[in-house]
Amino acid sequence: MNNVRFVGLDVHADTIAVAVAESQGEVRSIGTIPNRDEAVRQLIKKLGPVEQLRMCYEAGPTGYAVYRQLTALGVPCEVVAPTLVPVKAGDRVKTDRRDALKLARCYRAGELTAVWVPDGAHEAVRDLVRAREAAKRDQLRMRHRLGKFLLRHGYRAPAACGRAWSEAYWRWLETIRFSFPAQEVTRLDYLSEVEHAAGRVTRLERAIAEVVATLPAETRAVIAALQALRGIAHTTAVTIVIELGRLSRFTHPRQLMGYSGLVPSEVSTGARTQRGHITKTGNAHLRRVVVEAAWAYRHQPRIGPTLRKRQASLSPAICEIAWKAQHRLFKRYSRLRARSKCQQQIVTAIGRELLGFIWAIAVHVERDAARPGAA
């Protein structure tokens, strides 16, 4: 262990700044290398035997390509959470060289927090799920663009159309015509974009359903079990599982809540304790779907036809957890509402507590799957 060298990498699209911290000695910069496979292999040869190396770099837009290359070469590597890297309050100079030195120094001191790295197959499904999320955002943007264009020219959907973007609403859109050719071209272009966005979402959701059918049995079981919860249908359940992987890696639901960024920030000193907005330092994709699901718990507990159908093939233990969640979260919503709290803050608090029930169901399924003789 005395001969271990801790290597910090500041990885960018084209370059990698490298620094080395000897186990008992100095921390020095090695320089900058191109972010290319051959350059990384040459770096490993230069630094010495792979058994003596420990490498790390911050998670970022370059993904896990460097991590996978290093592990394939036999070098232990960790991808660390950038928001948890220690920062000196008075340090106002930031360069790639300094970042690499800081990573090497903190890695040797054990002050860095590693993130979970999915395997290639898991990351592929996650990319697909996030593509669907991006398509939904684009669809909303296109719908707003068309709606505001029509509103500027005095077109408002009649009450008989019901909800926006229903079949009746689409029929109303098809009846609109403009007298000026330029405006008619604009209307057709906006409408075409809305239709294209809808088709894109449909294709991606179909692809997600096909891919989920090929996932391991345990993963599919967790996805099905999470749908016992109110507000969590297939797409939301898939997003939760794909973003988190195995939920049993969190030893307590509070760890999952912190990972989601739904816990309040805190500044405490002496006898003063001050809590503020949620930290938002965790997984934003997970946070979004959980808060969306939490809106369902503002209603009285009940099991409707759709939820009953989702729970039909699940064990009584899982359904009991889901029923307990309905009662507990609705009561909490009612109490906070009675105190005149902001509704968005209430739903955020409900979402944080909902994560505890998500954790309980997922861990229950994963432990059942791990028992000897489990199918």
Image (cartoon, grey):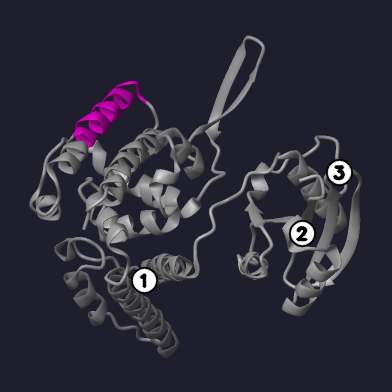
273 and 215: which one is in front? 215
Q: Is mark 1 on a helix, strand or loop?
A: helix
- Label 1 Cα crowd, 10 Å radius (few <14 / some 14-19 / many 20+): some
Quadrant location of residue 172? bottom left
Image coordinates for residue 215, horizontal then vertical, percent: 32, 67
Direction from residue 260 to residue 59 in the image, left or right: right
Question: Going by the picture, which residue comes out furthest to the top?
Answer: 271
Q: In the rendered image, which quarter is residue 203 located in? A: bottom left
Q: Give the range drawn in magenta.
A: 324-340
Left or right side of 58 for 200? left
Q: Residue tagged by mark 2?
A: 9
User: Which residue is at a point 55% across and 38% down the rendered structure image?
Assistant: 279
Residue tagged 3: 92
Could you tell which of marks 2 and 1 lies nearer the N-terminus? 2
Question: In this rendering, which labeled residue sits more in front, label 2 or label 3?
Answer: 2
Looking at the picture, tell me which residue is in the foreground, 71 or 140.
71
Q: Dot 1 corresponds to which residue? A: 150
The numbered mark, 1 or 3, whose residue comes first in the sequence reads: 3
